[in-house]
Image (tube, helix red, strand yellow):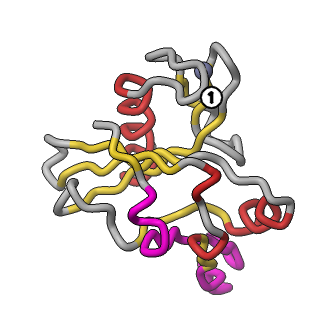
Amino acid sequence: MATARQELGALGETIVKRGCRCPKCKRTGSLVRLPTNFKCADVICDFCGYLAQVKASRVKDIDVVPKSVMGAAWGPQSERMAASIYFPLFLVLVSEDFKRHAIYYLASDLQLPEMFKPRKPLSLTARRAGWQGFHYDLVPVRDRFVRLS
Ligand SMILES: [Zn+2]
């Protein structure tokens, strides 16, 4: 059974596939989901190979980029940053009743290291003890997002 968070993530990827052109080759409908265990990106263009991350978040107001959204595992993210690898980010904001959504895009060139903030590792009693995640601090990059729809 998928968790609510996984379902929201899948919804975000579906919205991107239907609603976005590939930023590189400009095709519509070519950004397809990668397997969930794929670490670096969430969608790939099945025509040109372009990779991007997709973050979906349920918010009160889809017209405003939130201050922060939940990220993923910190380990691979910090290693990629050490290697100066950044992936473009689609941010899908979904209204609380799931009826409306907005798509925002942040090119990798416009990202900043300080937008990736490590969280505290999970306690030793947690199911995934010691696992460490990160969140996106969007305040320093808020005005760099482009709204696509
Ligand atoms: Zn493409």
Q: Which residues are magenta?
A: 119-144
**Snapshot quadrant of residue 101:** top left
Q: Residue 30: x and y, percent?
A: 52, 17
The residue at the far right in this view is: 83
Q: Is residue 59 left or right of residue 12?
A: left
Name the secondary structure under disc 1: strand
Tell me the residue at 33%/67% (across/down).
66
Position of 111 relative to 55 (above/below): below
Count every numbered label the image shows and give the total. Answer: 1
Quadrant where ligand 1 appears: top right
As for residue 136 lying within the magenta part, the answer is yes
Tell me the residue at 59%/77% (across/down).
117
As for residue 85 lying within the magenta part, the answer is no
Position of 133 relative to 57 (above/below): below
Residue labelled with disc 1: 44
Position of 65 relative to 115 (above/below): above
Q: Residue 140: x and y, percent?
A: 48, 74
Quarter in which the C terminus is drawn = top left
Q: Residue 68: x and y, percent?
A: 41, 71
Tell me the residue at 45%/69% (across/down).
138
Instruction: For residue 142, say whether it is visible.
Output: yes
Nearer to the camera, 113 or 125: 113
* Amino acid on which disc 1 is placed: Ile
Neighbor class of circle 1 (other Cα within 10 Å; few <14, some 14-19, many 20+) is some
Q: Is residue 71 left or right of residue 108?
A: left
